[in-house]
């Protein structure tokens, strides 16, 4: 007996099946040297807290790929992991300390790192549980963390190799500096905001003679660090001043006036103050002209000794003081309002300070060269293709990568400074003594590496590199790197560069980029807007399968996708539809005592041939779509098949046959289509398909043979996730059967529409005639089916040639291969219908009068926004149109009544 419950309750079965898969070791790949494995290394999740919908999308897409590949028989590895996430995590723990009134300086480095580890471990457990909740079939026995010993050794090894090759250097360069976090930041960690500020015009007195050069700046306090004034050599206004100098006010410092082509003559006065230590463009000018760098700020953005009388002031207080002093001296010419984009720390929102700082850098150009080549040669493919151009643009203009961070949480830079001989040493293993002079006075660099440095090694460090492990040999290079398009440069490009550099091989052959998730109106999801969907809540309400389906169906790579309650609801409806259909089939199996399927299914009836043909076409199409990473479209097609063909038509037709106990019974075939549909759906909806599969297994008592002879006779495996993915059988295509069934469906649908339109009771039989050409004999053969499905009797099917002229009381529907004439007489209670139509048109007339008055009201017209007025006009037009159609129906009704 099948014991399938009436309603599907996802919460009751999801954990059960996940635990079952886990306990059976299904997620662990079997190593088969003769087979090419399929490998996805999961983008490491930041240990900063809860998973959001973007993580759920990543996990779902990757799970779809690995479940599909596993069902196709590839040894499949999906390796999960987490990222220590440097600054992001450090800021979280700093905040927790702040809540207890403590700072990280007070607790000290060692204790702080210990606290951060505790937080990270808690987060990792949470992240693992949330991925398991989503059904992620990853190999937890191989789970990695970027700070694990293995990846940590990989980081040190990669660093030392680059250092030895001269590809890592320490130097003074312009970086983004967060004065609160007191660290360098990558461009990714900087958020740009438009700010309405001011442009200050400051006069610099000429040294050699009377007069001024006026410069314009948004940051007047930086004048303390100026080392030149630059003008464009073509600018006639300043021609005579090039080579002369000005004296900086207040601090009385003489600086030269230089000429540089980069100066934009239209900005401000055309004379540019050059502050090389605090502005990226000025830094470049300074490099060309050999200008000194004068750093005027401490790490916390207070002014240092180079700021003379302003030393100790905070940067904005300094700005006020500088402006007041300049004004006193008559050197502040004017102030204009000015909007510009200002960088802020992405973690703490403090305004960043562009600053020259002594940091570690990777010389990226030589690495980028190889990374460009492999994409050009097609060894690495980026999906969607349009991102390839963006990749090239970025890689061809790559700048050196600042990899040091003034943080505590992360991979400590493996560099030691000898206090005795002054030498600098990079080493994979901890150095106890100087390798040059033997001194034990060594100090390790206090900084840590940019979190993206360890992420860049992720595809090989997770598999054991730099050791020569079995995993590295078998699973590297990986197959697909799936991630968001927003980190193509920051992460994907770096993985390609570092993979090639460290292993000599590409890290993966395909980059699959997904888009962002937006709400139903296309807005970005954010806590501020209050439109965030929490994955755990969505799972509680709709079930995992519905969430996965809503996130991925109908989407395509690289495009943003909209998700909201209505999409979740319709996905849940689909799960329920599948559930109800399966329940019906399972109960029928019980009733018939069907315990085993015949290996060779007989497709005697036209609807059997039709659904079998449609299914095989679907399998063929889905296979092609999956191979081209079009998962969203594949899902959409499976959805359409299951809902609109299998459930809506085939099962309904089969029900008629089962009720009349006609032979052959459609049950074996129903079951076969169901189990193939389950297998098709499994990668997308793992839980409901497993639950139904298990019900089928129980119903079949293990006698189940998969599919028709075409798929071979395979006993049903103990879990659907180990069953083979369906393969299309071209021989099953039946164009004739499809043509007939398409016509049958069209006829039935058109009659049902008429019945709905005229509100005919579902129990009432109506009369219809069908005229057709080539399909005459086929349609006559299916007359019984049409009669029952459309509730028409008598149904007459005639040759088009013998068509009688249409009668007034007939409604004629013109279809693709047939015309259907439905008799209106007797279809409804005429009087009641007349009353209904009259009532409806009365209501509409009233509404029209109201709207009309409103649109003539000048007060309304002058006050209301144009689009509101336009909307009202449209409403009025629609109502008038409807009234018209009601009148037509009324007159049709009265003419048919006078006829009869
Ligand atoms: Zn910050
Ligand atoms: Zn030494």
Image (cartoon, rainbow, N blue to C red):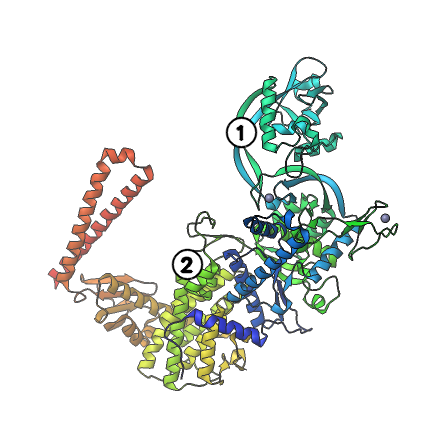
Spatial separation of the CA atoms under disc 1 and disc 2 = 44 Å
Position of 485 with respect to 519 (left or right) is right
Which one is nearer the viewer's eye here, 743 or 327?
327
Position of 885 with respect to 212 (left or right) is left
Q: Residue at x 76, y 30 (%)?
A: 290
Q: Position of residue 875 (x, y in %)?
A: 27, 45
Q: Which residue position is annotated with label 1?
A: 338
Q: Tell me: residue 36, above or below residue 147.
A: below
Which one is nearer the viewer's eye here, 387 or 291?
291
Residue 63 falls in image quadrant: bottom right
Q: Which residue position is annotated with label 2?
A: 567
Tell me if mark 1 has few (under 14), some (14-19) or many (20+) residues whose alpha carbon lies within 10 angstroms of its own. few
Quarter of the figure that contains the N terminus: bottom left
Residue 495, visible in the rendered structure: no
Q: Residue at x 62, y 53 (%)?
A: 85
Position of 454 with respect to 792 (left or right) is right
Q: Position of residue 533 (x, y in %)?
A: 45, 56
Q: Tell me: residue 271, above or below residue 295.
A: above
Which one is nearer the viewer's eye here, 18 or 753?
18
Q: Position of residue 489 (x, y in %)?
A: 63, 49
Which of disc 2 and disc 1 is earlier in sequence?
1
């Amino acid at each position: 007996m099948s014991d399938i419950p009436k309603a599907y309750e996802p919460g009751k079965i999801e954990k059960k099946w996940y635990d079952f898969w886990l306990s059976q070791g299904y997620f662990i790949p079997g190593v088969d040297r003769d087979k090419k494995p399929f490998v996805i290394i999961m983008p490491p999740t930041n240990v900063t807290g809860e998973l959001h919908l973007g993580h759920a999308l990543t996990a779902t897409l990757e799970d779809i790929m690995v479940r599909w590949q596993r069902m196709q028989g590839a040894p499949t590895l999906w390796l999960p992991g987490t990222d220590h996430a440097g600054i992001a995590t450090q800021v979280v723990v700093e905040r927790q300390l702040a809540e207890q009134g403590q700072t990280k300086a007070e607790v000290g480095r060692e204790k702080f790192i210990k606290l951060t580890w505790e937080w990270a471990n808690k987060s990792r457990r949470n992240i693992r549980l949330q991925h398991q909740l989503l059904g992620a079939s990853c190999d937890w026995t191989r789970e990695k963390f970027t700070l694990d010993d293995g990846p940590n050794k990989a980081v040190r090894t990669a660093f030392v190799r680059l250092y030895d090759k001269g590809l890592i250097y320490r130097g003074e360069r312009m970086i983004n500096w967060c004065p609160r976090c007191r660290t360098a930041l990558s461009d990714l960690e900087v958020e740009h905001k438009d700010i309405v500020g001011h442009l200050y015009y400051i006069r610099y007195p000429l040294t050699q003679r009377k007069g001024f050069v006026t410069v314009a700046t948004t940051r007047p306090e930086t004048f303390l660090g100026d080392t030149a004034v630059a003008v464009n050599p073509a600018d006639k206004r300043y021609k005579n001043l090039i080579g002369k100098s000005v004296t900086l006010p207040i601090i009385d410092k003489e600086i030269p006036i230089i000429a540089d082509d980069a100066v934009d003559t239209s900005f401000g006065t055309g004379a540019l103050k050059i502050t090389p230590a605090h502005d990226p463009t000025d830094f470049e000018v300074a490099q060309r002209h050999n200008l000194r760098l004068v750093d005027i700020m401490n790490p916390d953005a207070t002014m240092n000794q180079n700021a003379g009388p302003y030393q100790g002031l905070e940067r904005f207080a300094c700005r006020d003081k500088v402006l007041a002093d300049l004004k006193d001296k008559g050197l502040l010419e004017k102030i204009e309002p000015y909007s510009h984009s200002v960088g802020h720390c992405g973690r703490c929102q403090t305004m960043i300070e562009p600053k020259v700082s002594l940091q570690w850098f990777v010389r990226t150009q030589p690495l980028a060269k190889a990374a460009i080549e492999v994409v050009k040669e097609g060894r690495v493919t980026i999906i969607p293709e349009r991102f390839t151009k963006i990749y090239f643009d970025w890689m061809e203009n790559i700048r050196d990568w600042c990899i040091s961070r003034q943080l505590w949480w992360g991979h400590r830079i493996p560099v030691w400074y000898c206090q005795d001989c002054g030498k600098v040493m990079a080493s994979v293993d901890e150095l106890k003594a100087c390798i040059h002079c033997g001194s034990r006075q060594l100090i390790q660099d206090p900084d840590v590496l940019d979190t993206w440095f360890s992420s860049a090694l992720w595809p090989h460090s997770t598999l054991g590199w730099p050791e020569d492990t079995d995993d590295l040999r078998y699973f590297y290079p990986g197959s697909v790197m799936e991630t968001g398009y927003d980190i193509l440069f920051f992460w994907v490009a770096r993985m390609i560069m570092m993979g090639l550099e460290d292993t000599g091989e590409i890290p993966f052959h395909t980059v699959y980029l997904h888009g962002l998730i937006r709400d139903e109106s296309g807005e970005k999801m954010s806590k501020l807007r209050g439109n965030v969907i929490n994955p755990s809540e969505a799972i509680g309400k709709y079930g995992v399968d519905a969430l996965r389906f809503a996130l991925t169906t109908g989407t395509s790579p690289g495009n943003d996708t909209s998700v909201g309650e209505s999409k979740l609801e319709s996905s849940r409806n689909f799960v329920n539809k599948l559930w109800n259909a399966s329940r019906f089939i399972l109960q029928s199996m019980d009733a018939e005592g069907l315990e085993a399927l015949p290996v060779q299914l007989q497709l005697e009836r036209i609807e059997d041939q039709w659904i079998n043909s449609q299914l095989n076409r679907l399998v063929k199409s889905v296979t092609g779509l999956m191979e081209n990473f079009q998962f969203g479209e594949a899902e959409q097609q499976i959805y359409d098949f299951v809902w609109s063909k299998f459930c809506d038509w085939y099962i309904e037709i089969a029900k008629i046959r089962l009720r009349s106990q006609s032979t052959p019974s459609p049950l074996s075939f129903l079951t076969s289509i169901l189990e193939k549909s389950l297998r098709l759906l499994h990668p997308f909806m793992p839980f409901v398909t497993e639950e139904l599969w298990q019900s089928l297994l129980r119903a079949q008592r293990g006698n189940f043979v998969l599919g028709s002879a075409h798929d071979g006779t395979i006993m049903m495996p103990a879990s659907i996730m180990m069953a083979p993915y369906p393969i299309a059988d071209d021989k099953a295509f039946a164009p004739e059967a499809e043509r007939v069934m398409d016509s049958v469906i069209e006829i039935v649908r058109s009659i049902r529409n008429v019945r709905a339109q005229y509100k005919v009771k579902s129990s009432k039989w109506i009369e219809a005639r069908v005229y057709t050409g080539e399909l005459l004999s086929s349609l006559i053969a299916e007359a019984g089916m049409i009669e029952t499905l459309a509730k028409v009797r008598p149904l007459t099917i005639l040759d088009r040639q013998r068509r009688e002229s249409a009668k007034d009381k007939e409604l004629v529907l013109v279809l693709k291969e047939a015309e259907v004439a439905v008799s209106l007489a007797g279809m409804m209670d005429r009087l009641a219908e007349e009353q209904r139509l009259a009532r409806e048109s009365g209501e509409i007339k009233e509404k029209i009068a109201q709207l009309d008055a409103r649109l003539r009201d000048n007060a309304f017209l002058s006050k209301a926004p144009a689009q509101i007025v336009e909307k009202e006009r449209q409403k009025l037009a629609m109502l008038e149109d409807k009234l018209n159609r009601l009148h037509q129906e009324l007159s049709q009704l009265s003419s048919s009544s006078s006829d009869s």
